[in-house]
Image (cartoon, rainbow, N blue to C red):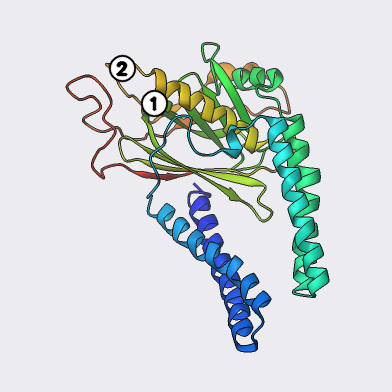
């Protein structure tokens, strides 16, 4: 897959950026010490300390060292409603405006602060806020299209969906569709106009979870998942569609994940679909020029040989025998 290492490259880019930023503000702190400028020293440390902490966090993510997921805990921003998210973003904008004003008054790094601050303010206002407002949890038209081209079946209960594109005529290779079903997270990666790769992971198999912003302006999200079978999955939501909000989709995903983990019954085997080619000849009758006629190749996340312990429950700790998958 062309984008197999896309998520890894994104994390490496963040680490490089943090090193450069930390070095710059580290020099600022050093200059503040040499000149006795306490304000300059304090400003430098405000950025250096969190930067070093974030570098360590991202390095642990590359090694698949994620915290165990606890239903209902963590990821506070994504657990908020759309209105609450918009309120948090507004407070963030006010804080950024305060930093810009502080920079202008003290004449510290005025140019970079103005450029970065104003760009962030515009992006938050006209991109992130807008897509949170217009996002639809389940778009019936898109749901019908996905069923029509064979990505889902009438039996699937879809709780939320997200796509990287706004219409089928704009589909590009590596565009992705994410679905939250009643018991699974599904990722479909478009390869060509007539081919796609599908990965499906049982919600109750998810043991670890990390969420990181991605993209030049933070418009996307990276989902880092660790399963009970030690499979590591990194999924990238590009966030380039003005109709679909990664933030809102992740909120619905967390709700479904909490329900699945809290209501999982003993004795239910943890299964993941086998990898196989799935030609769909019945789709040939659809002559729409906008929608692809998709052949779906499913990829397998190997399950542990010990899917069930003696009590019939899925074990929450296993050996390092899984695979790593970047989508």
Which residue occupies 64% across, 20% down? 143
Identify which residue, 81 or 298, lies in the foreground: 81
Which residue is labeled 2 in the image? 268
Identify which residue, 108 or 190, lies in the foreground: 108
Which residue is labeled 1 in the image? 204
Label number found at residue 110 = none
Q: Position of residue 168 (x, y in %)?
A: 70, 31
Disc 2 from disc 1: Cα separation: 10 Å
Say what secondary structure mark 1 lies in.
helix
Residue 318 left/right relative to 213 = left
Cβ atoms at labels 2 and 1 below 8 Å apart: yes
**Res 205 visible:** yes
Which residue occupies 76% across, 39% down? 129
Q: Residues within 10 Å of mark 1 (few under 14, many from 20)?
A: many
Q: Position of residue 216 (x, y in %)?
A: 67, 56
**Res 244 visible:** no
Among the 4 quarters of the image, the one containing residue 16? bottom right
Q: Position of residue 27 (x, y in %)?
A: 59, 80
Q: Residues within 10 Å of mark 2 (few under 14, many from 20)?
A: few
Q: Position of residue 93 (x, y in %)?
A: 76, 50
Among the 4 quarters of the image, the one containing residue 318? top left
**Is 92 drawn above or below residue 110 in the view shown?**
above
Which residue occupies 63% across, 32% down? 80
Which residue occupies 75% across, 75% down? 108
**Is 9 drawn above or below residue 197 in the view shown?**
below
- In the displayed orientation, state which residue is furthest to the bottom: 34
- In the displayed orientation, state which residue is furthest to the left: 310
Say what secondary structure mark 2 lies in.
loop
């Amino acid at each position: 897959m062309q984008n197999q290492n896309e998520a890894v490259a994104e994390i490496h880019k963040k680490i490089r950026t943090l090193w450069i930023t930390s070095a710059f503000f580290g020099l600022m702190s050093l200059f503040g010490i040499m000149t006795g400028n306490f304000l300059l020293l304090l400003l430098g440390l405000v950025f250096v300390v969190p930067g070093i902490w974030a570098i360590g966090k991202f390095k642990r993510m590359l090694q698949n060292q994620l915290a165990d997921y606890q239903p209902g805990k963590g990821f506070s921003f994504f657990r908020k409603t759309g209105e609450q998210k918009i309120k948090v973003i507004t407070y963030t904008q006010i804080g950024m405006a305060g930093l810009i004003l502080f920079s202008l008054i003290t004449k510290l790094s005025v140019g970079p602060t103005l450029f970065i601050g104003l760009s962030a303010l515009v992006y938050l206002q006209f991109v992130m806020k807008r897509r949170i407002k217009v996002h639809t949890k389940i778009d019936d038209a898109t749901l019908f299209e996905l069923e029509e081209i064979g990505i889902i079946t009438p039996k699937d209960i879809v709780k939320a969906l997200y796509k990287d594109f706004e219409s089928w005529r704009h589909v590009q290779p590596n565009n992705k569709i994410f679905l939250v079903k009643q018991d699974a997270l599904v990722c479909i990666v478009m390869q060509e106009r007539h081919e796609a790769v599908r990965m499906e992971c049982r919600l109750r198999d998810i043991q670890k979870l990390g969420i990181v912003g991605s993209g030049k302006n933070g418009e996307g999200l990276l989902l880092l998942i660790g399963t009970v079978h030690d499979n590591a999955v990194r999924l990238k939501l590009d966030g380039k569609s003005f109709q679909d909000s990664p933030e809102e989709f992740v909120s619905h995903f967390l709700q479904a994940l909490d329900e699945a983990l809290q209501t999982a019954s003993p004795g239910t085997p943890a299964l993941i679909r086998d990898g196989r080619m799935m030609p769909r000849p019945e789709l040939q009758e659809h002559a729409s020029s906008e929608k692809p006629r998709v052949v779906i190749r499913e990829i397998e996340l190997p399950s542990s040989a010990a899917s069930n312990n003696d009590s019939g429950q899925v074990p929450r700790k296993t050996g390092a025998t899984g695979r790593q998958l970047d989508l």
